[in-house]
Image: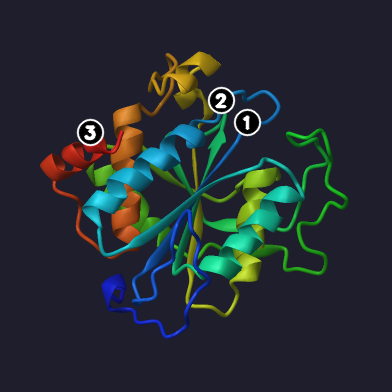
Amino acid sequence: MQHRQSIVRTTRRHPSAHDPVPSDGRTTLLLTGFGPFPSVSVNATMMLVPRLAKAARRLFPAVHIVTEILPTEWVAAPARVEHLLRIYRPDIVLHFGVSSRARGFEIESRGRNQCAMVPDASGCRPVTSAVVGGGMDLLPSRVPVAAIVRRLQLQSIPAYRSWSAGTYLCNATLYHVLTQTTGQACEAGFVHIPDKLAGSAALAYARSELRTRPGCPLTWPQALAGGLEIIATLLDQPTPNPARRTAALRDGK
């Protein structure tokens, strides 16, 4: 795998006052999570993604990191992703979502062109049962799934290859980004984490407290360390030094 720092760009991207886009050829990594949705009042990815981004900026200063918490809505989520892809043209896109079935980190291997006819956070249902009309039934993820799982397991972090991202917004978002980046030099993938990771009280989120519900197969220290390990893998970087990782996580709160 080519080292990301060697990638050189000649295309100037649109600037943003909030998150200025570099014009110096740096690798751009887009990290996303999701907001609340029916039955999940506090989405763990709302808490995970900002912390990962802050720590990753310290560990990988040569990488431009963009974050977004997507609305858990059938129309708004893919529209927002399409906008982000157009503006930032990321080299790597890594989506995080929650699942009640996640046994730890579930690294998705593919997106399915299928939508469950269930309501989103706004109460709306998908217009059709296909994510993209006329699209392929399955699209393979464009991240090194096996390598990610292996590196996480070597850190004693529960991680698995998943063959189904479900049929809700997580799968739809993965399928959309794989479709929208077809033919581009863009790695794109999706990672599920347990929904229990966030705990049940919205107050915990307001206070930025990282409390895990009893019985959750993944702890917050594992989630944060594992998220950084995934990013390092995608950047073709070695496992972050434990002391530097701890410092980056502490300073990134």
Residue 48 position within the rendered picture, expressed as x and y whole percent measured from the top left: 42, 36
Count neighbours of disc 1 (C-alpha within 10 A) and say few if under 14, some if 14 to 19, many if 20 or more. some
Residue to which mark 1 is pinned: 36
Residue 114 position within the rendered picture, expressed as x and y whole percent measured from the top left: 75, 53
* Residue farthest along the right direction in this orientation: 127
Q: Which residue is painted at 24% across and 50% down in the image?
A: 58
Residue 39 position within the rendered picture, expressed as x and y whole percent measured from the top left: 67, 23
Find numbered disc 2 in the image and state the secondary structure of the residue it sits on: loop
Residue to which mark 3 is pinned: 250
Q: Which residue is painted at 23% across and 37% down in the image?
A: 251
Q: In terms of depth relative to the viewer, which is nearer, 231 or 134?
A: 231
Q: Which residue is painted at 82% across and 65% down in the image?
A: 133
Q: Which mark sits nearer the N-terminus, 2 or 3?
A: 2
**Image-quadrant location for residue 166:** top right
**Image-quadrant location for residue 125:** top right
Count neighbours of disc 2 (C-alpha within 10 A) and say few if under 14, some if 14 to 19, many if 20 or more. many
Answer yes or no: do the residues labelled 2 and 3 have beta carbons within 8 Å?
Answer: no
Number of marks drawn: 3
Q: Please state which amino acid type lies under the numbered disc 1.
A: Pro
Visible residue check, residue 163: yes
Residue to which mark 2 is pinned: 42
- Image position of 12 (left or right of 131): left
Q: Please state which amino acid type lies under the numbered disc 2.
A: Val
Count neighbours of disc 3 (C-alpha within 10 A) and say few if under 14, some if 14 to 19, many if 20 or more. few
Q: In terms of depth relative to the viewer, which is nearer, 9 or 139?
A: 9
* Residue farthest along the front direction in this orientation: 17
- Image position of 223 (left or right of 119): left
